[in-house]
Amino acid sequence: MNPLRLSDPTVFLKTRFLQARKGPGLPADLRRGTRRMEGSNNCVQRASMQSKRSVDIDLAGEYAVRTPLGDSDTRRQSLARDEAHFALIAANAGVGPTVYDIWYCASSTKEQAKGLHIVMDFFEADLHDAMFKRTEWVAREKPRIADAIES
């Protein structure tokens, strides 16, 4: 899957970002795992472009699909657009997860919740988890993390 590379996301956010999508809205070959991780406003599932059924997407999926929950602040179009704008800027600057697809669903359907949807790189831990819950993982990955920060 190719990353969204937008020098100026403004036009995208006024056009393609708002276009209605059929079904779950995801790229055709993207398959989601079954395990969901939930926060206060969104849930995330691992996903993979691999078509082999033997792949355990919940363990090996290289993408994250973020979808809004019922009380997500990104159900409001203006807030979703602002968050999408900042996510695209961070991704293009190399300081945020790579964004492969991003869209706003204007009204809930059986397969899509109203709000902001993002397909992005999957990361093993967020900063809070890394600092307080996964210190052994951070110690093991310290050289790789340092290289990524320096480059």
Image (cartoon, rainbow, N blue to C red):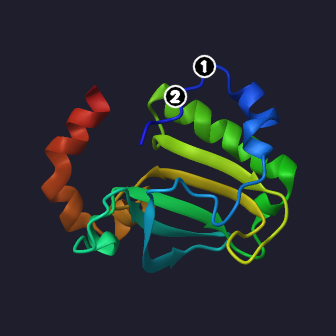
Question: To which quarter of the image does residue 147 belong?
Answer: top left
What's the amino acid at mark 2? Asn
Q: 43 left or right of 115?
A: left
* Residue 11 place in picture, x, y as percent: 76, 26
Secondary-structure class at tag 1: loop
Residue in view at x 57 percent, y 57 percent:
26
* Residue 57 place in picture, x, y as percent: 32, 70
Residue at image mark 2: 92
Give whichever of 133, 71 is nearer the camera.
71
Question: To which quarter of the image does residue 145 belong?
Answer: top left
Quarter of the image that includes the N terminus: top left
What's the amino acid at mark 1? Ser
- Tally the marks: 2
Instruction: Identify the mark nearer the N-term, 2 or 1.
Output: 1
Secondary-structure class at tag 2: helix
Do the numbered discs 2 and 1 sit on residues whose CB atoms are within 8 Å?
yes
Residue at image mark 1: 7
Quarter of the image that includes the C terminus: top left
Residue in view at x 68 percent, y 43 percent:
84
